[in-house]
Amino acid sequence: MNAHEQIVNISFLEQFTNGDRTKMVKYINMFLQSAPGSIHTMKEQLAAGHFLDLRTTAHSLKPQLTYMGINGLKETILRIEEYAGQSIKPEEIARLIGEVENTCLAAFDELKSLVEKMS
Amino acid sequence: MHKEIVFIVDDEPMHAQMMEDHLRSKYPHFEIHSYKTGEECVDNMDKNPGIVILDYHLDSIDKTARNGIEILNYITKQYPDTYTIMISGQDNIDVAVECMRSGAYDYVVKNETSFVRTEAAIERLFQHRVVLHSNKQYKLVNRVLTIGMIAIVLFSLFMYFTGRIH
């Protein structure tokens, strides 16, 4: 991925809040609080072989990523849900979770700097 | 204005907050209560909500929590006048059919459009209520008229047989 390529796209948030920065910061902070935990939980669930729980966690993360405009992970999350739902391909799921984690870590940085700018 | 009591039941704080903010901006007269679990929703049903916006997956954080369908079935059975709008991240026809068969008024997929779709569902629900109310009034008028007609016929027969009408 290009170092200058934007991962997040806050156009939905801007439209949803009518450009209200206070609300945007509130939602971004909620995401920054919950998403790292969800990624950690997915890893734990995979390690424990709790595939159906893993599918539910991925499923609940999906709309949050959408609201933050992290659109590059749509397919990745869908595949995690699909494989976890069938309890197959644990190695591939691990790779996909790694992809989610790496992209999200970069997204978190972008969002944090956005929050700083907006605050 | 009539105060509409609305429950939002969702264990994802961000989505619940966004839904609450959206509905508050569109419907300032709504009294909105947010709950993270179906159990909390059930415990507060004595507030008599007119609308419940219920997440299908209520066990994404607490794996022992009752899921949305269980709560929907409970509401449908115990509170038939409450309208339930199901929300789910699953764009899956089977899930939608399951929800509608269990008594959901509508089914909305959790994505960027879920807020306006929920609003649209609420507008349809209000129209549905108006039609139901008109229908009830029509039935009431119909019943009163029928009883009135029967009373007139009986009175006429009484008058005829008692010789007061020739």
Image: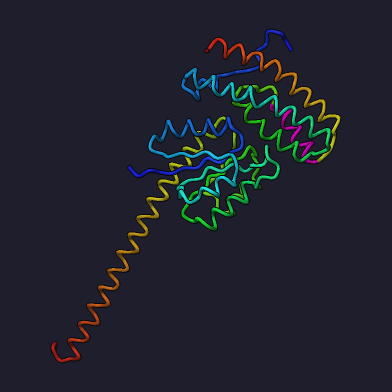
Which SS does the magenta portion mostly show? helix
Q: Which residue is more in the foreground, B99 or A33?
A: A33
Over which residues does the magenta segment extend?
A: A74-86
Is residue B79 a member of the stretch shown in magenta? no
Where is residue B25 drawn, in percent x and y?
A: 42, 30
Is residue A16 shown above or below B42? above
Q: Dividing the image into 4 quarters, which one contains the N terminus of chain A?
A: top right
Q: Which residue is more in the foreground, B66 or B156?
A: B66
Q: What colouring does the structure picture have?
A: rainbow
Q: Which residue is more in the foreground, B1 or B124?
A: B1
Residue at coordinates 70% horizontally, 27% vertically from top-left? Answer: A37
Q: How many marks?
A: 0
Image side of residue B136 versus residue A89, left or right: left
Image side of residue B104 versus residue A40, left or right: left
Residue at coordinates 28% horizontally, 68% vertically from top-left? Answer: B144
Where is residue B123 drawn, in percent x and y?
A: 43, 41
Residue at coordinates 83% horizontally, 36% vertically from top-left? Answer: A48
Residue at coordinates 38% horizontally, 52% vertically from top-left? Answer: B131
Is residue A110 shown above or below A101? above
Is residue A30 shown above or below B92? above
Is residue A76 a member of the stretch shown in magenta? yes
Is residue B150 shown above or below B48? below
Quarter occupied by residue B111: top right
Image side of residue B88 versus residue B116, left or right: right
Where is residue A7 drawn, in percent x and y?
A: 66, 16
Where is residue A111 drawn, in percent x and y?
A: 62, 16
